[in-house]
Amino acid sequence: MSSVLELALGIMTALGGSVDISQLVFAIGAGAKFEYLLLWVVVLGTIGIALYSEMSGRISAVLKEPTFEIVRTRLGWGPAFGILVASNIVNVLTCAAELGGVAVILQMLVPTNYRLMLLAGTTLLLVTVFVLRFKWIERVFGLMGLGLIVYAVAAVSLEPDWSEVARGLLPQLPASAMPGTSVYFYYVVGLFSSMVMPYQVHFYSSGGIEDDWTPKDLPINKVTAGVGYLLGGVLTMALIVVGGALYLPQGLDPQRLSSTIFGASVPLGRVGFVLALIGIFFAVGGAAVETALATGYNFAQFFRFPWGKRLKPGEVPLFTLCWMGAFVLSLAIASSGANPVEIVEYSVVFAVVVLPLTYYPILRLADDKNMMGKHVNSPVIRVLGWVYLGLICVAAAAAVPLMIITHMGQG
């Protein structure tokens, strides 16, 4: 019974923690601009993140090797250090956007100075991470983030044309009345990248070690990664449907997180507003925590210092200093006054540039029979892994040019 409960909690926390501000921004925006035409990208991204998370979790359970130890071992010190710097720049940018989102939510509850709410939100998250152990961090933010399910209810309540929704599951170019092809592909890359952000794999693999996974836990790893991210993908699809059914007909382009909240309140009223507020606060706050912790994990793992929330802060000083420093740097960026939506667009675009060198070592190690033994990738997983690595490389090559050409999706 305890195993069933652990599995259920794992799936729910994966679901509640699978959507962050980048998906909220790109999914709602994709629906507002292209109706349901980008639903196929969600399918692609969901399979990709589930695939690589399962591989990284399996490596953690079998070898007790987290992602950045793998990167350093497989690529060498110099290239791995470059990836470390690039990944943590992306982490800090993403964390800054998430902290900005937390401040926006708090400001909607207590109308006062934005920077004051930013400081209050960051302090609250920092203290929470300092006090709670890893398992409770996962559960608090993951389970409370389940409030985002309100968007699935809102999507159904808006009564979209379900035949058009189904058509969106197959790739097709935009209609003439929609923004141009370059903007379309900018959203393809942005939405795909938002679903396979590197911090998610860093956090997931380190979490497997935090939770003391062994080969006996591989079924839990497989179901958590598969079912949790699948349900998260459905939730992201619901955001696109809300964008397409609510914002597109009115010609609105939601450029602020507060606009996203009203996507649930229009069809569902006050209840929808409250649940969206709660769900977004914990989903965005949880993502801020994950990116800050991922920064600490990355540095400590690369330099092979002790790390982990399972240990007291004084026992892992470098790790503690790094994740706290990530919060402080992110707070400084968010305090600059930049729109959190703009920050997240930069972080998503630059994240996809880093992705190939993050995912390649994971795939190579999971494919290595000498290291993984009977837990090596199956032929199907191996083929899918290389296919997705190719797609990630294409997205990485296209990301920056598309950002420049489209002025960050504005045409």
Image (tube, rainbow, N blue to C red):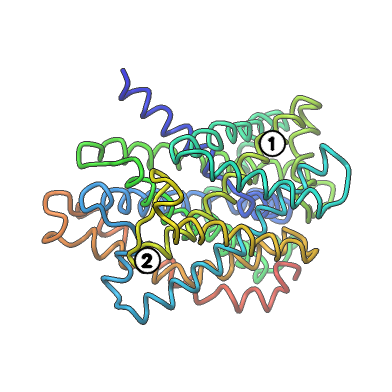
Can residue 231 be seen from the camera position used here? no
Tell me the residue at 71%/67% (across/down): 409
Can residue 99 be seen from the camera position used here? yes
Picture coordinates of residue 232, whole percent (x, y): 51, 41
Circle 1: is it few (<14), some (14-19), or many (20+) Cα within 10 Å? some
Q: Mark 2 or mark 1, which is nearer to you? A: 2
Amino acid type, label 1: Pro
Dot 1 corresponds to which residue? 160
| Secondary element at image label 1 | loop
Marks 2 and 1, the one that precedes in the sequence: 1
Tell me the residue at 36%/29% (across/down): 7
Q: Which mark is residue 389?
A: 2
Residue situated in front as seen by the camera: 185 or 123: 123
Tell me the residue at 58%/41% (across/down): 128
**Residue 184 is drawn in which quadrant?**
bottom right
> Gap in Å between the C-alphas at discs 2 and 1?
34 Å
Picture coordinates of residue 168, whole percent (x, y): 58, 48
Amino acid type, label 2: Leu
Picture coordinates of residue 34, whole percent (x, y): 69, 55
Residue situated in front as seen by the camera: 44 or 143: 143
| Secondary element at image label 2 | helix
Give the side of residue 29 with respect to residue 223, left or right.
Answer: right
Tell me the residue at 36%/67% (across/down): 302
Query: Looking at the picture, does residue 303 appear above or below residue 67?
Result: below
**Residue 84 is drawn in which quadrant?**
bottom left
